[in-house]
Amino acid sequence: MKLTDLVRPNILTLKPYSSARDEFHGEASVFLDANENPLNNPYNRYPDPLQRALKQRVAAIKGVSADQLFFGNGSDEPIDLVFRIFCNPGVDNVVAIDPTYGMYKVCADINDVTYKTVHLNPDFSLDASRLLAATDEQTKVIFLCSPNNPTGNDLDTQAVKQVLDTFGGITVIDEAYVDFADRPSYLKVLDQYPNLIVLQTFSKAWGMASVRLGMAFANPAIIRFFNTVKYPYNINLLTQRFVSEALEQANQTRQWVAMLVAERAVIAKELARLPLIKQIYPSDANFVLVKVDDPNAVYAYLVDKGIVVRNRHTVTLCQGCLRITVGTPEENKQLLDALAAYA
Ligand SMILES: *Cc1c(COP(=O)(O)O)cnc(C)c1O
């Protein structure tokens, strides 16, 4: 489907807010255009609404062009914008895998958009044909998350390709955990799929969840809609500068990822020896999902030891499951020692 058939009519014709920073950029020395306080440099000034400097640098690292990149206040902002740009409230629907990340449904509910789910197979693999069969004329978006949260597995690339090749609407692939998987990002095929949106984040591998910077990658026509609908100054100056400097430590990030992936294997191996653990699901992310007989009791026991994991017992297909984030070697040892002592 053409982009103009997918975008909500009111968004297609939207005249976006034009800020002082939008209307003038160029060389000047006296800025009397934005009602800023002239003192307290540099915090007195509104930040670049399009984060051009940071975008150039991140785009180079990711191997895309800057006009294929949108920055949001975390990934949650582009997730919400997808609904606001493409889905007519009370009319359109989206289809998502289940279980998956909870924000897609929350954003659908906030925007009054029907959220249809298709269960993953019991081994958490994706049945693309079943997913596609759940779409209809009013389905604007399919949400995939790979590696998936909370299951930890990467979705089969052939199944994802089937969705991309078949579905006429927008496909979102959330790659928050892609750095921990051993396949290349779907950014590699961004140029082949004009309706593909890939989400990544600085919150996980880069270790910067507190700064709130998420990325959406898509063809420039989609990125333009993101830019017209977002709040004018959605990324503050502190975040833009901090991340710009942190990009220097890309090597550090690679080392962190290598350490966490190695620790993930250690945890999986050690957990497998504990009778308490009934099943460990394979993980391509920085966490493992495990099944136990009495998840509520194990959860409470760990909290009593000062260790918090995520209880996913009530989530679709995850009965009995706890989700355990990979920590430092010392933290992981504490977890394993505590579980070994569980009576
Ligand atoms: C953690 C996570 C994110 C990251 O969200 P931010 O808002 O960027 O911190 C996105 N998607 C999934 C599936 C996640 O688990």
Image (cartoon, helix red, strand yellow):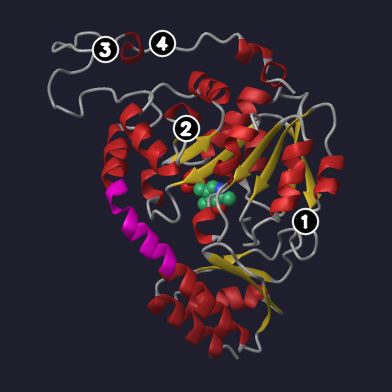
- Label annotation for residue 69: 2
Name the amino acid type tagged 4: Ser
User: Residue at 61% of width from left, 78% of height from top?
Assistant: 298
The residue at which mark 4 appears reads as: 18
Q: Are marks 1 and 2 in contact (CB under 8 Å)?
A: no
Q: Please say whether residue 297 is visible from this viewpoint.
A: yes
Label 2 vs label 4: CA separation?
A: 20 Å
Query: Does label 4 or label 1 sit earlier along the sequence?
Result: 4
192, 119: nearer the viewer: 192
Q: How many marks?
A: 4
Is residue 338 positioned above or below 252 on the image? below
Query: Does label 2 or label 4 sit earlier along the sequence?
Result: 4
The residue at which mark 3 appears reads as: 34
130, 57: nearer the viewer: 57
Magenta span of residues: 246-258
In which image quadrant can residue 183 be found? bottom right
Name the amino acid type tagged 3: Ala
* 251 falls in the magenta region: yes
Q: Please say whether residue 177 is visible from this viewpoint.
A: no
Discs 2/4, front? 2
The residue at which mark 1 appears reads as: 120
Mark 4, secondary structure of its residue = loop
Main SS of the magenta part reads helix
Q: Where does the image place residue 128, in percent across and percent down from the top left?
A: 80, 48
Is residue 99 positioned above or below 220 on the image? below
Name the amino acid type tagged 2: Leu
Query: Does label 1 or label 2 sit earlier along the sequence?
Result: 2
Query: Does label 2 or label 3 sit earlier along the sequence?
Result: 3
